[in-house]
Image (cartoon, rainbow, N blue to C red):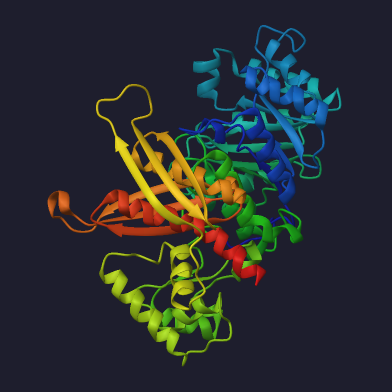
Amino acid sequence: MDDLSKMPAFVDILDTTLRDGAQAEGISFSVNDKFAVLGALSDIGVKYVEAGNPGSNPKDREFFSTFIQRKNTSTTLCAFGSTKRKDKSCDEDAQIQSLLSAGTKTVVIFGKVWEFEVQEILRVTPDENITMIADTISYFVSRGIEVIFDAEHYFEAVQDNDGYARACLTAAQAAGASCVCLCDTNGATMPETVGRRVAEAVSWLDSDICKVGIHCHNDSGVAVSNTLAAVLAGAGHVQGTFNGIGERCGNTNLSTIIPNLQLKYGIRCIPEDRMPMLTTIARKIADIENVSLSGNAPFVGVSAFAHKAGMHVDAIKKNTKTFEHIPPESVGNSRRLLVSEIAGKAAILELIHKIRPDFDKASPEVEQVLGLVKQMEHDGYSFEGAEASQELLVCRELGLYKPFFDLERITVNSEHPHQGEMSASSFIKIHVDGKAEITAEEGDGPVNAMDKALRKAMEVFYPELKKTRLSDFKVRVLNHHATASRVRVLIETTDGIRTWRTVGVSTDIIAASYQALVDSLEYPLMLARLQST
């Protein structure tokens, strides 16, 4: 699109993680989870948070009733529901009354604008549907409640009968909606069509009283592109979810769209001073969702500013613009120079500088660490995805490492067949500063049992480890010698704010897991020790 004259100076962001995002497979928010997500979104300055339908289930009813008592957020909470039924007034419609009882300043009302759906799904006449839209919106507006109208399946609707789709939007505006949001409900529309259709709607409606919004699903992999096209065509309201979760293939990813709009186009989405919180908030929400944030997620992934090839690393050291489109710190992320068998001294020196900034490229320790890394990677280690193990390796080579415990004995037992969920147990005895701790735990498999036993024993001496938990566990077979194959174990650990990764390699999966587990627990302790010296 060449004409950007309709591009807004700012857009309102509506996050629907707690409603549309909750429809993603494997996602289930508790009431406390919902408040944690709401708090994170409020912290970063999202204007609206859509939190569900108070009439659909007991959990949402409890959330809204609790919110009424708290109301301690600067973000506007929205209840979500549909237009009234054809045979009931708003006063008689239980779903409308549940929205009213939610006590929110804003409601999001979705309605049919596709004539096909009106006749086949609602089984009402086109005129009856327009009346349902207008009556529902005016009912809330007359009570001082802001209404955002979601035009479901809008792009199919306008393709089939643009006159009827337009009549629905016009009725919503006339009834008092502050925004009509055009929904690509099936995620089927392409960016050029979205841009054209949004521009048409912007020309129909009065932007002084009713914004045009966009809500895209990612079924065709273009939700972010569609949202950008919509905003450039004049949409002043954007809906999506942090990290892009949602039903089927997900929704527009707000952790991608916000920095693209604000940093690339100069369109304000959140307060400028909140942008450096973006990575922390995205990772915090992923942790609440109990999902692993993709490493290559734009802007916020751990690999978003990672550099591996020696020539790239050397260029980055000279001028970061060579291989970075923005400064990573502008979105709260950080640069990573990956250490691997193809890395040069620049990457190794950058790693050492985290611990000993006084070293230079000529320091013999640089060559020493580089040689060790290359040998270990030849043996099957992969440090590019395990920075915590990298840093511990450097500490050992520089003589800064002192074990945080001494292991006397560990046993792991797995039973087959087994009864109940716990199929394994682990016994461990460790010593710290001359004091012994003996612990036994059951687990869902031998690694889980060993993790729980080791963690429980170490928490006696290092209670700060209670904040950490294992968030991902991967095993890769490195060669194929039947049961004698060498395996690599990669473990991801988080404390809810930071995430770190460790690695272990052995022909024994338990031994490899133990190496990675020990590193995962000693890493935060080592950081604290270095910071205190």
Figure label count:
0
Left or right of 325? Residue 137 is: right
Percent x, y of residue 7: 68, 57
Percent x, y of residue 142: 85, 23
The vertical placement of 98 against 63, above or below, is: above
Which one is nearer the viewer's eye here, 120 or 524? Answer: 524
The quarter of the picture where the N terminus appears is: bottom right
Which one is nearer the viewer's eye here, 490 or 13? Answer: 490
Name the residue located 69 percent from the left edge and 63 percent from the top edge: 266
Left or right of 406? Residue 30 is: right
Q: Is residue 259 visible?
A: yes
User: Which residue lies most toward the front here?
Assistant: 434
Which one is nearer the viewer's eye here, 422 or 286? Answer: 422
Name the residue located 59 percent from the left edge and 43 percent from the top edge: 241
The quarter of the picture where the C terminus appears is: bottom right
Task: Locate residue 67: give its quadrant.
Answer: top right
User: Which residue lies most toward the bottom here?
Assistant: 362
Percent x, y of residue 217: 51, 40
Task: Locate residue 530: give its quadrant.
Answer: bottom right
The vertical placement of 151 against 488, above or below, is: above
Q: Is residue 196 visible?
A: no
The vertical placement of 172 against 14, above or below, is: above
Percent x, y of residue 100: 77, 19
The vertical placement of 247 against 401, above or below, is: above
Left or right of 433? Residue 171 is: right
Name the residue located 55 percent from the left edge and 79 percent from the top edge: 353
